């Protein structure tokens, strides 16, 4: 899968986590509930960090990583 565009991310409505790249995921909980999740390893254990709400404005930094 290539780079996810803001338009494609805004169109996601099914709940789940969608891989964007390099540990970055878009978590969809409902039609209007989306947030960024960063997954990484620390001391050999898997960790997750919430990065805030998704906004479908053009030029979003989260999609340009």
Image (spheres, grey):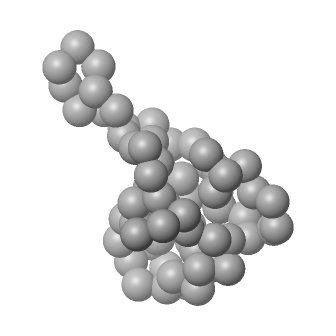
Q: Position of residue 51 (x, y in %)?
A: 57, 43
| Displayed quadrant of residue 45 | top left
The relative height of residue 62 versus residue 50 in the rendered view (above or below) is below
Q: In the rendered picture of this protein, how many numbered marks are placed on residues?
A: 0
The relative height of residue 59 versus residue 45 in the rendered view (above or below) is below
Residue drawn at the location 48% of the way across and 67% of the way down? 2
Residue drawn at the location 81% of the way across and 68% of the way down? 57
The residue furthest front is 2
In front here: 15 or 22? Answer: 22
Residue drawn at the location 37% of the way across and 65% of the way down? 17
In front here: 20 or 15? Answer: 20
The relative height of residue 4 versus residue 63 in the rendered view (above or below) is below
Q: Position of residue 30 (x, y in %)?
A: 49, 79
The residue furthest top is 43
Examine the rendering and report whether any part of residue 11 can be seen. yes
- The reply, left or right, for residue 54 in relation to residue 41 is right
Q: Position of residue 48 (x, y in %)?
A: 37, 38
Examine the rendering and report whether any part of residue 32 can be seen. no
The residue furthest right is 58
Which quadrant is home to the N terminus?
A: bottom left
Residue drawn at the location 72% of the way across and 64% of the way down? 55
- The reply, left or right, for residue 5 in relation to residue 18 is right
The relative height of residue 58 versus residue 45 in the rendered view (above or below) is below
| Displayed quadrant of residue 6 | bottom right
């Amino acid at each position: 899968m290539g780079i996810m565009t803001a338009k494609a991310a805004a169109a996601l409505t099914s709940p789940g986590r969608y891989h964007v790249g390099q540990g970055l995921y878009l978590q969809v909980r409902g039609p209007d509930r989306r947030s960024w999740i960063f997954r990484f390893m620390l001391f050999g254990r898997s960790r997750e960090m919430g990065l805030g709400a998704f906004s479908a404005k053009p030029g979003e930094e989260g999609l340009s990583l």
